[in-house]
Image: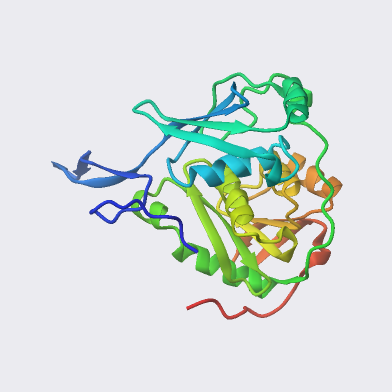
Amino acid sequence: MEARQDPRTDGAPQGAVRREPLRLRGDAAAREADWIAEEIPVAFAFNGEPFAVMMATPADIADFAVGFALSEGIVETANELQIEAIDTTVDGIAVSLRVPAARMAAMSERKRNIEGRSGCGICGAASIDAVLRPPRRVSGGIAIASGSLAAALIELERRQPLNALTGATHAAAWADAEGRLLLVREDVGRHNALDKLIGAMQAADIDAGSGFCVVTSRASYEMAMKAAQSGMPMLAAISAPTALAIALADSAGMTLVGFARGDGCVAYAHPHRLHASPLAESSP
């Protein structure tokens, strides 16, 4: 399933805008049309109280809201969350959400300053405890062949229309055991892309234990936390993990893979879910 498209006559995916920067080549200079990734404030309010403002690509906002609430541990299940309104203005997007009163009481201990960065979910957190919270324990999961991981990475290169236009976005994808991508989400922020994927998985009723996640970024602590919190048994990143991400994955029982490439990868935590195999057949 591809990212939803904006019904504009130019055919570009939502989140890309046309600009005419000055391009210099040697001693020549000319203004040429180019596609630029959008980045706007997306404000989340729970039960009428502002909680966080994230700088994000204005696409798949409902997926973003659900994934954010789940991956941040604000709610345990999507059934506890209701999207009351998504309002778009010239200044950004405001998302009004409702959660049970008990969840609001717990949220007060992790109150954020309402000022974000591009996809940085922990920027503005009020305390160290709000950031370094215990991860959810991941159980189950299926055996994944290294060839299936390679097939997913090959397909992912073809499933990023926004990045193909702008060169400025990350992607997070969900693959089945054979490496076929079922969902892909893009955003200027790597954390946002993962949140959008988590929300999309909920909407599609996909069992987190049925496959694995691949991301076009490093495996930071927060990426590992979001994946574990959503019950993903394996997170594979094309770049390196951090030491804290490895420690979190180890504690959560989640398989963490870094430097995922078509010709190999490195398993940093719980490698039992990953086994060597030839390259699986990728989707046409």
Residue 150 sits in quarter: bottom right
Q: Nearer the viewer, residue 37 or 279?
A: 37
Which residue is at a point 62% across and 56% down the rendered structure image?
A: 201
Residue 106 sits in quarter: top right
Q: Nearer the viewer, residue 245 or 160?
A: 160
Which residue is at a point 65% across and 38% down the rendered structure image?
A: 69
Q: Position of residue 217 (x, y in %)?
A: 57, 49
Q: Position of residue 163 (x, y in %)?
A: 41, 52
Q: Position of residue 55 (x, y in %)?
A: 48, 32
Left or right, residue 243 beside residue 26: right
Whether 110 is drawn above or below 181: the answer is above
Whether 279 is drawn above or below 244: the answer is below
Q: Nearer the viewer, residue 64 or 97?
A: 97
Left or right, residue 236 beside residue 189: right
Residue 24 sits in quarter: top left
Q: Would residue 74 be seen by someone viewing this image from the given angle?
A: yes
